[in-house]
Image: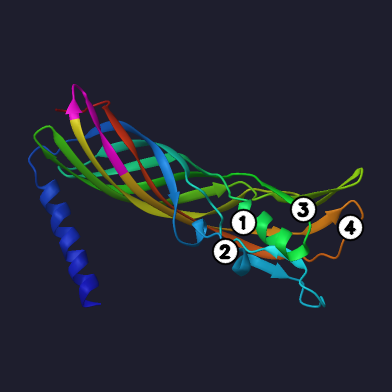
Amino acid sequence: MKNLFLLVLFFGFMLQSSFSQENPPQRFSLSVSAGPAIPVGVFGGKNMENAAVYFPDSSIPNLASISKASNGFADVGYSIHGTLNYHFASHFYVFLRSGVTNNPISVTEMEDFVNDLYGLDFRFSHENNNMLSITPGLGYFLKKGSWEYRTGIFLGYGQINYPYYEMVRVVGNETLTWAHVGSRPNSSSITAGGNLQVSRAIGKFQLGLEASYQRADFDYSIFPRTSPGGSQSVTYEDTIKARTLNFGLFLLYPLLGYEK
């Protein structure tokens, strides 16, 4: 409680100092960042032994689903975001950040595990995880000559596509497909994160590097069964625990009311 009180006092002092400037700048800028999105934590986990969900009443191991809450199987993808900034004080600004983070899903571990389990030849496919987000945030910036340093935190809305995957096996002239049956709605969640930017002035632009972290938990339902012919199945509730560490180039351009 004491630490929280001191933290509030600190930020209160910083804001008061910023607003105490005789002519605090009021200015807009637009920035874009893009680069690789690295899955971290369980989102990048690829342990099928932990992710496999079995039918509880089966006499032999019988795969019923794959838990994304324990392992996301995500590979390195990409992240692209645009940000509108409003500098309301000497060192503080608010911003609205929007963009997409796309991560392909590794199926090699799924195929190897299932083929070893059943002693048959299955092939997996999985749609990429494509997360859209729009997040307001609060940032702090500092200029030192032509160099500029920024850090911020954000919290807002995130949406991800349905994590559809299927397992296929060809038997003679028939193709057997094990996959989710039913609608495939997008999932929504609160998403949060933070970023750090270092840039240098080149004419009117600021060009540099950005590192950011973003997380969100997306709940969804899955009802996997084999077709044609059908098979025993149960609806499972699962969660995609999206966690990415993003690195990339950062470009900022001044807009209305920007003062150098």
Q: Are marks 1 and 2 in contact (CB under 8 Å)?
A: yes
Q: Which residue is drawn at 73% across and 58% down?
A: 115
- Left or right, residue 182 beside residue 109: right
Residue designated by label 1? 109
Measured in 3D between alpha carbons, the distance from the residue under mark 4 to the one under mark 2, in whole angstroms, is: 28 Å
Q: Who comes first in sequence, dot 1 or dot 2?
A: 2
Residue designated by label 4? 230
Image quadrant where residue 253 sits:
top left
Residue designated by label 3? 121
Q: Residues within 10 Å of mark 4 (few under 14, many from 20)?
A: few
Magenta region, residue range: 201-210
Measured in 3D between alpha carbons, the distance from the residue under mark 4 to the one under mark 1, in whole angstroms, is: 25 Å
Please tell me whether the stretch drawn in magenta is mainly helix, strand or loop: strand
Of circles 3 and 1, the one toward us is: 3
- What kind of element bears circle 2? loop
Of circles 4 and 2, the one toward us is: 2
User: In this orientation, which residue lies closer to the viewer: 131 or 18?
Assistant: 131
Is residue 207 found inside the magenta-colored segment of the image?
yes
- Left or right, residue 74 beside residue 155: right
Percent across and percent down for residue 227 are 86, 52
- Left or right, residue 87 beside residue 246: left
Q: Who comes first in sequence, dot 4 or dot 1?
A: 1
Q: Do the residues labelled 4 and 1 touch (CB within 8 Å)?
A: no
Measured in 3D between alpha carbons, the distance from the residue under mark 4 to the one under mark 3, in whole angstroms, is: 19 Å
- Amino acid marked by disc 3: Asp
Q: Are marks 4 and 2 in contact (CB under 8 Å)?
A: no
- Amino acid marked by disc 1: Glu
User: In this orientation, which residue lies closer to the viewer: 45 or 157?
Assistant: 45
Q: Where residue 47 is drawn, which disc sits there?
A: 2
Image quadrant where residue 220 sits:
bottom right
- What kind of element bears circle 3? loop
